[in-house]
Image: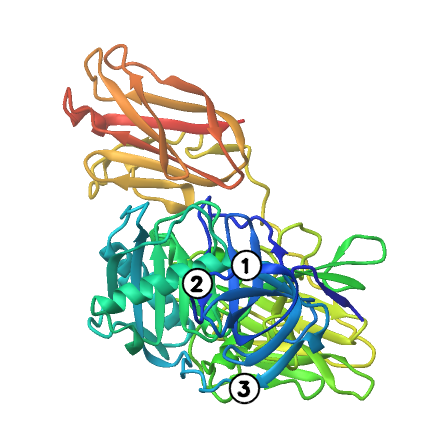
Amino acid sequence: MATLIHTNIPIRFLKSVPGKGALASVLAIGLVASVSTFAAGETTVEGEILNTHVDNFETKESRQEEILKTRDQKFLKIKQRDDQPQLESGTKVQVKGKKRGDEIEVSEPSQVKTLAAPSEPPKDRTPVGDKKVAVVLFNFAGDQRQPFTGEQIRDIVFTNPEGTNAQLGQSSYGKLRLSGASRPDGDVLGWYTIPESNETCNENVYYTWINSAERIAKEQGAALDAYDFVIYVSPNMPGCASYGWYDGGRSYINGYTEKSSWYVYAHELGHNFRLPHANSLNCTGPDGRRVAIGSQCVSEEYGDLYDVMGSSNSSSGQTNGWYKNRLGWLSPAGARFAEGSGNYALNRIELPSDQAQSLLIPRTRDAAGTVQDYYALEYHLRGTLNLPVPRYGTTIRVVPAANLFDINTSRSTLVDTTPETPTFEDAPLAEGAAFVDPASGVSILAGRYGGPQAVYQIQTGGAPLILPPVPPKPKPASKPARVRQWVAAGQAYTSCKVGKSAGGCKTDPAKGVFALKNYRVAYKTANMEKGRYQLNINYKNVARAPKGYSYKVRIKVNGKVVRTVKMPVTSPGQQERQFKLKNLKLPADESKVELEWLNNKSVGSKYDANLAITKVELKK
């Protein structure tokens, strides 16, 4: 069976994510207070657990932190092994360990003793319905910059048709809406100046900042307890992080204020919804080459380009069906379990449906036969928002069978079905393509795409399904041309005014000839091989245009004007002559070339109606 190695806990070094720039990160929080410093040595401390998720897009790090809020309102970061269990925020604990500055280090789970469950159940922050959101702007006594306005933030989070609210609305099929308690188009409060310094930043300092901003806002009349989610935003500080608190409904954004930053707010709200990251699965076979699924696989943080909880700025604003089902966004029939081999249909994941949109196929089982994880399939095409997505098809992810809300074990991991390329941009399974996992006996054959539903042939367990070979992509009917001659030798097309029959210049799409208005004619072609060409035009003046008159020709390549040239008349009643233009560059195969004859306004257009074009040729 494949081995999934999570190399990213507690600190996960990320791949470079395009588009995030040198901005700082984001934070979602539960409770906050001042920093506590203790002398080194063994100690026993009692307090309350606060779960924090850290996203630092500047340093490409992400980590989960457990903070101990002590009885005297101090804060210690609990440093422990990666495999130690995660406790709910609000759990009363006794921690025994070594104190080093603002950290307490424990080596065994037994050193964290649970005294009591959370005294109050967490506030219902299920992301369904009209959720009240406030954005609080704050700065510092020593840094009172106000580099953005409340209206800018309102646009990003609430009102922009491609902003956070719209993105979450589409992903939830309209089940989630963000609004303000005072204004339906969103509440943005502040600026508030806190007394603390921003010269350094770490987890404990962030708690202090947010606590201080909350206190001052409330003193000035802000009813923050009326909101389901509160987002705190400060001016950008390079090197500092952003956070999301799993159970607290609060987040901190470190200066993301560009319109394209909607994904940062959506990502951190996702952590408030208790969603982990969406990762990718990088697998290698025995020979060290990349494979779709193999004996050695590494889960790479933020690696899912198709999920806002992954490389979110590249996504369509969607999160995957596994996460949507956890949040209550899919219909009761939305998540379907594969009960055995057979044909299964899926509706598009980004559009609302009362039918199956996510298919879960058992992947691995323990010795007792209990399913440990699944392959999760979903079919997707472009959604209704004009947001970038690398490619469409069928995404395949590995998802766990249990621990749905444990950040360390509940991540989805995207499978790359085209491992021969180094990128995950083409990770989805293509139309008519097959994915085979020999170890688990799972085989998936994709059907036709393009409609509201796709059908898959699934084999579960036993020997892998013998799949038919995937047919090669159809080749073009003919090789891109190296020579194109619009006008056959000896046949003349005379420029004319549309509607007149004289001169034989009627539109003939088969030959690429189009009569235009105002004594103009155009020639168009496609299917040209890339390279440099010579343009040859044979023509004659049949109207005895005066000496010095020129016929103007506009040349377009792939819709862009590259040259405007003149074909001069040297004498009245001249015989046929040839115009040559060398080094006309076509940048790619299948290039489209257009030639348009324009009116010569300086002399008048009457002579343009008497231009006889006997040959137009592109020759490589």
Q: Give 335 or 11, whichever is nearer the viewer.
A: 11
Q: Give 407 or 206, whichever is nearer the viewer.
A: 206
In the rendered structure, the answer to whether residue 495 lies left or right of residue 406 reads left
Q: Residues within 10 Å of mark 3 (few under 14, many from 20)?
A: some
Report the disc number at residue 196: none
Q: Residue furthest right?
A: 286
Q: Residue at x 48, y 54 (%)?
A: 241
Q: Quadrant of residue 511?
A: top left
Residue 207 drawn at (x, y percent): 44, 62
Camera sees residue 312 = no
Which residue is tagged 1?
A: 305
Could you tell me which secondary element the residue under label 2 belongs to?
A: loop
Which residue is tagged 2?
A: 34
Q: Quadrant of the C terminus?
A: top right
Say whether marks 2 and 3 touch (CB < 8 Å). Answer: no
Q: Earlier in the sequence, mark 3 or mark 1?
A: 3
Amino acid found under the numbered disc labelled 3: Ala
Q: Give 80 or 446, whichever is nearer the viewer.
A: 80
